[in-house]
Amino acid sequence: FLGGENSLVQIVGWLTWLAAGALFTSMVSKSHDLPWPKALGASAIQLIALLSIIKLGTI
């Protein structure tokens, strides 16, 4: 296993988040008939909330 400090692991992690953001934005755009910029904003808010739940945990 490679550790979390390895640059390859960090690059793969960032690419995974970017791909998830693009797919999630596309899904929100198509399911709610929103233009791309509004769907991007909605997706960004939801992904930030998801990241905070993952990193901080629930109370």
Image: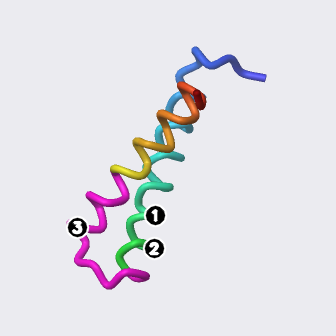
> Principal SS element in the magenta part?
helix
Residue 4 drawn at (x, y percent): 62, 19
Q: How is the image coloured?
A: rainbow
Secondary structure type for disc 2: helix
State the mark number for residue 38: 3
Lower position in the chain sequence, tag 1 or tag 3: 1
Q: Quadrant of residue 9?
A: top right
Secondary structure type for disc 3: helix
**From the viewer's perspective, is residue 35 above or below residue 7?**
below
Residue stretch rendered in magenta on the structure: 30-44
- Image quadrant containing the C terminus: top right
Q: Nearer the viewer, residue 40 or 54?
A: 54
Q: Is residue 6 left or right of residue 24?
A: right
Q: Nearer the viewer, residue 14 or 24?
A: 24
Residue holding disc 1: 24
Q: Residue at x 25, y 72 (%)?
A: 36
| Spatial CA span between label 1 and label 2 | 5 Å
State the mark number for residue 56: none
